[in-house]
Image (spheres, rainbow, N blue to C red):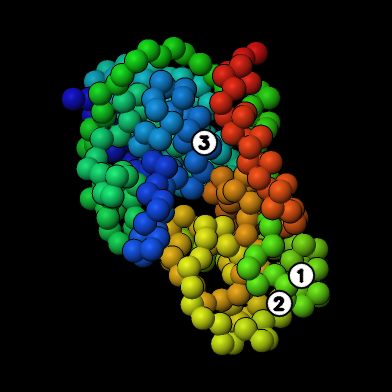
């Protein structure tokens, strides 16, 4: 069985796949890759199924040794030190070094065969708060050794096309639909959400991105009943500063939801980092659905993804 040896784990490296949706009624968060588009494309570059488990690297990379060699790819934000968005053939004993992120927050080290760890509720994703899933439920440490799964099917060297990189490029403008409490917010608050500039604060993580900007009015929401919340919900606590609930979110909440990030832009939330300034633009539910369909068509188009 081929292995990956962790020489240096970087700031925060975990095993992630496409997560475990569908368990929210039992209080289980979806987890999974913060940028699922990058994970899917990285796996395609090495001939894996799109949801194969990979290593999620956050802000700084790391060093990883492959005693038996491997076919690998790095996908996501541009990190220093190694080619991005292309298939890499790593010889036996090769060490792959990945530096700091030039922009964005995360990239994925995908290896042919995927990372082999025990599944929890059908997923290999790490849930750090619960210490479940992934590699012993935690971030990777120096000296960890991970198994690479058995590869199936054919593969060939490929590079993501320029037009695909442009289409899936990070953006600081997020499209949102009206949240369940949208109509209960004042006109001034609704205008401030779309018209304001919001800074991602340092106390953001995979559970949620805390934003700082013009305070939104929350009077009248003091007696809200706690209920289920969706991935990408934009909650507004009493201080008036929004939080985008993300992949390691809690499954219930009692703060009003002024908006919900459209699914087409959730992967872009995964590439935001502290200090980034973002804006929101509202779209209708019908527009959000069509945007998601268009993204799905692009992801299914081999010529678009890997053609000249």
Provide residue 165's location: percent of width, then percent of height.
63, 29
Compared to 172, does 193 lie above or below? Answer: below
Q: How many marks?
A: 3
The disc, 1 or 3, on the residue closer to the chain's N-terminal end is 3
> Residue drawn at (43%, 65%), measured in percent from left and top?
251
Can residue 50 be seen at all in this image of the molecule?
yes
Can residue 94 be seen at all in this image of the molecule?
no
Residue tagged by mark 1? 190
Labels 1, 2: front one: 2
Residue tagged by mark 2? 184
Compared to 266, does 304 lie above or below? Answer: above
Provide residue 5's location: percent of width, then percent of height.
26, 34
Residue tagged by mark 3? 38
Provide residue 48's location: percent of width, then percent of height.
39, 25
State left or right for residue 206 relative to residue 142.
right
Q: CA distance from mark 2 to mark 3?
A: 36 Å
What is the quadrant of residue 102 in the picture? Answer: top right
């Amino acid at each position: 069985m081929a292995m990956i040896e962790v020489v240096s784990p970087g700031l925060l490296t975990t095993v992630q796949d496409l997560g475990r949706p569908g368990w929210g009624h039992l209080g289980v968060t979806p987890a999974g890759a913060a940028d699922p588009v990058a994970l899917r494309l990285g796996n395609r570059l090495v001939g894996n199924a799109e949801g194969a488990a990979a290593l999620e690297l956050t802000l700084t990379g790391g060093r990883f040794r492959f005693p038996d060699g491997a076919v690998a790819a790095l996908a996501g934000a541009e990190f220093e030190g190694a080619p991005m968005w292309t298939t890499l053939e790593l010889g036996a004993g090769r060490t792959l070094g990945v530096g700091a992120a030039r922009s964005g927050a995360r990239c994925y080290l995908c290896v042919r065969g995927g990372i082999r760890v025990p599944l929890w509720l059908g997923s290999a994703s790490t849930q750090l708060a619960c210490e479940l899933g992934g590699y012993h439920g935690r971030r990777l440490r120096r000296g960890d050794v991970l198994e690479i799964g058995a590869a199936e099917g054919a593969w060939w060297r490929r590079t993501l096309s320029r037009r695909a990189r442009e289409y899936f490029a990070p953006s600081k403008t997020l499209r949102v639909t009206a949240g369940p409490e949208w109509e209960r917010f004042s006109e001034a608050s609704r205008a401030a959400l779309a018209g304001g500039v919001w800074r991602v604060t340092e106390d953001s993580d995979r559970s949620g991105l805390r934003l700082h900007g013009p305070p939104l009015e929350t009077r009248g929401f003091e007696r809200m009943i706690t209920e289920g919340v969706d991935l990408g919900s934009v909650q507004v606590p009493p201080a008036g500063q929004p939080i985008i609930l993300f992949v390691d979110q809690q499954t219930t909440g009692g703060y009003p939801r002024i908006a919900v990030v459209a699914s087409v832009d959730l992967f872009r939330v995964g590439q935001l980092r502290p200090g980034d300034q973002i804006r929101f633009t509202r779209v209708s539910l019908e527009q959000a659905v069509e945007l998601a369909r268009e993204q799905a068509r692009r992801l299914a188009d081999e010529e678009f993804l890997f053609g000249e």
